[in-house]
Amino acid sequence: MIKLKKVLTLVTILIGLFMTSCSNSDNTEDLVGNWIKKSSFDGPARSSSASFVIGNDVYVATGYTGDVYLNDLWSYTSDGDFWEQKADFIGVKRSSASAFEINGKGYVGLGYDGSNRLKDFYEYNPSTNTWTQKADFAGSARYGAVGFQVANKAFFGTGYDGNYLKDFYQYNPTTDVWTLSPGFGGNKRKNATVFIINDNAYLVTGISNNVMQYDFWLFNGTNESWTKLRDIDRGDSGEYNEDYQIIRANASSFVMNGLGYVACGDNSTTVWQYTPTTDLWKEKTSLEASGRIDAVGVSLNNRGFIMLGRSGTSYFDDSWEFKPNDEQVDND
């Protein structure tokens, strides 16, 4: 009888393990989306690069290899899936700079050179493959700020200058003047991410005083006003956000088909999809590569990409495209 009880107990444990395994497998299979490996970056592996998109090309500038700061510039052509080196950035070598595109030109500024926080600012003209120094950023020298263009208006904001920041400044390329853009009611932070849907910029994630930030904000580029959206922290059972695991810093983002995506950050591979009409997030298939921080996330012709980044002292030169509605396939 004792032997029979032991056998029955063992069978029960095995069945439990089997059911748990099946349950975990089912949860994984429920996630939709597929990552496709693209042409590896031709330059040195790096993290904390600045990026902008002009026409059909992604431009990646500056960064850090773990040994040296960089000032090179590379373009990625998605249709041909190849990289090409362009004219070196003319500012001091740096990482954690900020960037945006406006009127067909790229702009890069701010960052950290290993000793100093920076506030210089430069324009890249793809037609002539040349850089021109422009007026210094009007705020304090900083790194880990966000840069974005929405409704044909360009902004730098947040970051770290020795203190965590929440200010925003607008840049006018016609007059080469920066002006303070007030009204943001969110928390201070660095290493947040921004994605653009129509004429709205969505600011999310980041860190302040070693605390991950969970507030989520929409900036309307037309009337230049901020609106607080639902928080991204996990709620109680039965609430809209009970399964959320979005909070992080040093993440990357992109947009496809009117939906926003936040990926990686804090050495994670997870991906979350945002629907603006419902103000809700849904988990998608994780990046099919190493978890990473400080990667490049870009939207190009309604396609989304994650490139470069690091995990600890490992720096990456890989590039990945996300297909949000495809079934996950290994090694494609």
Image (cartoon, rainbow, N blue to C red):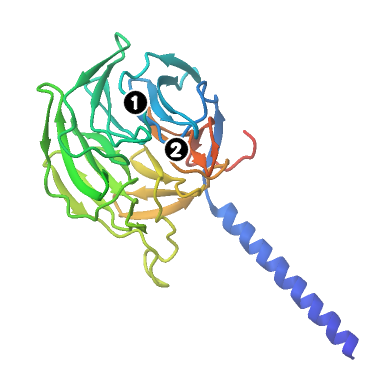
- The residue shown at (84%, 86%) is 5
Element type where label 2 sits in the image: loop
Instruction: Determine whether, in the image, residue 17 is placed left or right of residue 184.
Output: right
| Relative image position of residue 214 (x, y in whole percent) | 33, 58
Mark 1: amino acid? Val
Mark 2: amino acid? Ala
Q: Which residue is mark 2?
A: 295
Element type where label 1 sits in the image: strand
Q: Which residue is mark 1?
A: 53
Q: Is residue 29 above or below residue 81?
A: below
| Relative image position of residue 75 (x, y in whole percent) | 41, 19
Distance from disc 2 to disc 1, alpha carbons, whole Å, reads 15 Å
Q: First in sequence: mark 2 or mark 1?
A: 1
Query: For residue 255, which quarter of the picture?
Result: top left
Q: Is residue 258 above or below residue 163?
A: above
Residue 302 seen by the camera: no
| Relative image position of residue 135 (x, y in whole percent) | 16, 25
